[in-house]
Amino acid sequence: MTIISNLKLRIWRQDGPDDVGRFETYRIDEISDEASFLELLDILNERLISEGKDAIVFDHDCREGICGTCSLMINGQAHGPQRGTATCQLHMRKFHSGQEIVVEPWRARAFPLIKDLMVDRGAFDRIVEAGGFITAPTGGAPDANLIPIPKPVADAAMDAAECIGCGACVAACPNGAANLFTGAKIAHLNLLPQGQAERDARTEAMVETMDQYFGSCTNHGECEAACPKSISIDVIALMNADYLTAKFQNRKKLSRT
Ligand code: SF4
Ligand code: FES
């Protein structure tokens, strides 16, 4: 274990959506390089509480990279300096003694700030809600191998399903676009046989809901670089192709009703 010493933290504090907010500076004398970044904030919060001050509000839950709740912009990088890693999996060994660390919330119009480092990512829920349900037979669970799926297709669907809905892609995007998130959510169903029945309706509804809240994608690729699950921007190309098809298919279906 190595001790990291003399850290200067500049942390965004904002009492609520109507407060203008400001950076506040905190010193950490010593911390183990084995501590996680969220543990650093825990230790700081314990100190603030013992001094009778307000703890810093930040989102977290599983602390093992699966829930998508943690969401910090660290030194200008969504989830910090380690690629393919959520904030909760980032450790202090990635920093050095004497370093200044700037911590901010996700900054995107679609994610309004709640307090300090916590934002409302409900716009993601609206996109998923718009996708609706897939047709599924009721009764007992069918055998897993009842519907043969080629391995590359299953792998691609599973890769897309890895999206944890953290919002780093939106925070990193200069346009505040949610195309990587929406593309991942659409791809993991559209690639599989079980997702075909509602494919066109789901794609159209999800893309058009996304457009109501988020900016437009101009292929910067910042989303892929920031994604803790390394979701490929290929899912955006898939989504765009599926959306075009869906517009024609849905219009054709409408003309027949
Ligand atoms: S695509 Fe990646 S960055 Fe975007 S919400 Fe999903 S896991 Fe997070
Ligand atoms: S707290 Fe669950 S992914 Fe970070």
Image (cartoon, helix red, strand yellow):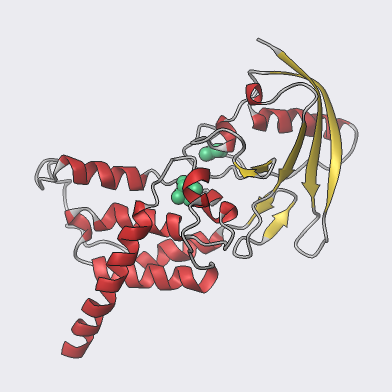
Q: Position of residue 201 (x, y in %)?
A: 28, 72
Q: Position of residue 152 (x, y in %)?
A: 20, 42
Q: In the image as oriented, which residue stretches furthest toward the top?
A: 1
Residue 210 at least partly seen: yes
Residue 202 at least partly seen: no
Residue occupying the point 81% across, 55% down: 15
Q: Position of residue 246 (x, y in %)?
A: 26, 73
Image position of 203 with respect to 194: above or below: below
Image position of 128 with respect to 4: above or below: below
| Occupied quadrant, residue 88 | top right
Residue occupying the point 46% across, 68% down: 210
Image position of 9 with respect to 68: above or below: above
Assign the N terminus to one quadrant of the image.
top right
| Occupied quadrant, residue 197 | bottom left
Residue occupying the point 61% across, 60% down: 111
Q: Position of residue 155 (x, y in %)?
A: 25, 41
**Going by the image, does 42 lie left or right of 246?**
right
**Going by the image, does 148 lie left or right of 86?**
left
**Going by the image, does 24 lie left or right of 113?**
right
Residue occupying the point 64% across, 21% down: 93
**Going by the image, does 190 lie left or right of 118?**
left
| Occupied quadrant, residue 90 | top right
Nearer to the camera, 97 or 71: 97
Please give the count of numbered marks on the rendered protein.
0
Image position of 244 with respect to 5: above or below: below
Nearer to the camera, 79 or 197: 79
